[in-house]
Image (cartoon, grey):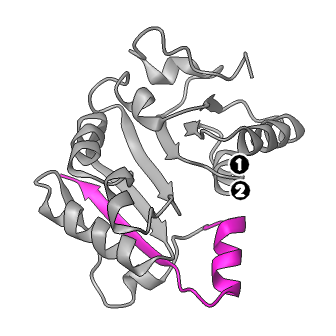
Amino acid sequence: MPKLALDLAKPLDDPAALFGARVRETRLEIGFGGGEHLIEAAALEPDVGFIGCEPFVNGMARLLSLIERRGLENIRLHRGDAVDVIDRLPDASLSRVYLFYPDPWPKRRQRKRRFISADTIARLARVMRAGAQLRFATDIDDYAAWTLARLRASPDFRWTASGAADWLQPWEGWTRTKYEGKAIAAGRKPVYLTFARD
């Protein structure tokens, strides 16, 4: 962990320099859970730098084990709130952001705790370059509608769906997460939303 952990005591002025070899772009995964998607994405594109944020120690420990086993050098980690990383990144420094199955905070009084809000959308817009994608997946209908409403209201993002089935199909090369498998087994249908930074 000391080798892979971000030092947030200072701004991350050059995210590409965080990685042993120079990378062509940098991506962020917010709340990577068990790390299933992050590890496969990093293995598939070794010339891309991935920053993963996860507050829970079990997910962090599992991913560290997978990184070591697979010998990957293009992942850096933050155990904590992704907003702390976002606030230290320079403008237009990310080419893609992943947010898969975030905590839905289903009770009405809890919804202010959802990651997607006008505030976090504005923060993400600052650090995402033009054309960068925000990929969002959930199995909670209300959170899908919540996310669509807020991102469509943002002047910085556009929903890229062009057909009715677009949001029902995962992305090419998609790695099913453990959480997604549980959701499908329970009869819930995942939704996959893609937004582009204007």
Magenta part of the chain? 174-198
**Whether residue 36 is situated above or below residue 26 in the rendered picture:** below
- Whether residue 193 appears in magenta in the rendering, the answer is yes
**Whether residue 9 is situated above or below residue 103 in the rendered picture:** above
Task: Please tell me which residue lies in front, 34 or 111.
Answer: 111
Q: Secondary structure at mark 1?
A: helix
The residue sitting at 65% across, 84% down in the picture is 184
The residue sitting at 33% across, 67% down in the picture is 108
Identified by mark 2, the residue type is Glu
Identified by mark 1, the residue type is Ile
Relative placement, left or right, of 34 versus 99 is right
Task: Please tell me which residue lies in front, 104 or 70.
Answer: 104
The residue sitting at the top extreme is 10
The residue sitting at the front extreme is 109
Q: Which residue is mark 1?
A: 39
| Cβ–Cβ under 8 Å for marks 2 and 1 | yes
Q: Which residue is mark 2?
A: 36
Q: Is residue 160 visible to us here?
A: no
| Residue 24, percent from left and from top | 49, 34
Q: Residues within 10 Å of mark 1 (few under 14, many from 20)?
A: many
- Whether residue 190 appears in magenta in the rendering, the answer is yes
Q: Which mark is residue 147?
A: none
Q: Is residue 196 visible to us here?
A: yes
C-alpha separation, residue under disc 2 versus residue under disc 1 = 6 Å
The residue sitting at 17% across, 66% down in the picture is 152
Relative placement, left or right, of 25 versus 118 is right
